[in-house]
Amino acid sequence: MSIILRLDRVMADRKMSLNELSERVGVSNVNLSKLKTGKVSAIRFSTLEAICKTLSCQPGDLLEFIDDGGREPPAQQ
C-alpha cells in the first residue's frame, strides 16, 4: 500500500509553476520539488492546507491511495 502525491498534476491543471507555488505557499522550492516528485514520507497539515488554499483544491486531489498487494495495514497501538 502506498500514498501517491499528485501535486504535479494539480499544478499543471492550474498552470502554476513551482516557483509561483513556492512564493504563494511560503515553502522552499526544494521542499515543494520533493513533494512534487513524491520523495517525502510526511507532510505538515499546515503545508497541505496552504497548498490546497493556493491551488483551490481538496487534499484528496493531491493524495491518492494505491493498494498494491492487498495486505492489511499494521494495527494501531
Image: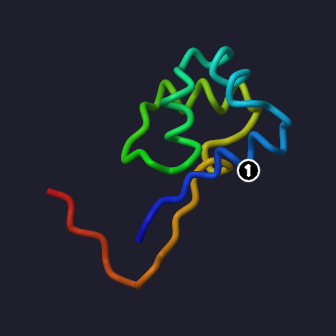
Q: Position of residue 5 (x, y in %)?
A: 56, 52
Q: Residue furthest bottom?
A: 70
Q: Quadrant of residue 43?
A: top left
Q: Position of residue 1 (x, y in %)?
A: 41, 71
- Name the residue nearer the viewer: 45 or 7: 7
Q: Is residue 1 left or right of residue 6?
A: left
* Residue ID at (59%, 43%): 36
Image quadrant in which the C terminus is located: bottom left
Figure check: 2 above or below 60: below
Label 1 amino acid? Arg
Figure check: 4 above or below 62: below
Q: Is residue 57 left or right of residue 65?
A: right
* Residue ID at (73%, 38%): 57
Dot 1: what SS? helix
- Name the residue nearer the viewer: 10 or 33: 33
Q: Quadrant of residue 73?
A: bottom left
* Residue ID at (68%, 16%): 24
- Name the residue nearer the viewer: 77 or 1: 1
Q: Quadrant of residue 53?
A: top right
Check disc 1 and report the residue beneath it. 9
Q: Position of residue 26 (x, y in %)?
A: 57, 15
Q: Residues within 10 Å of mark 1 (few under 14, many from 20)?
A: few
- The colour scheme used to paint the residues is rainbow
* Residue ID at (61%, 43%): 59
Q: Position of residue 28 (x, y in %)?
A: 52, 21
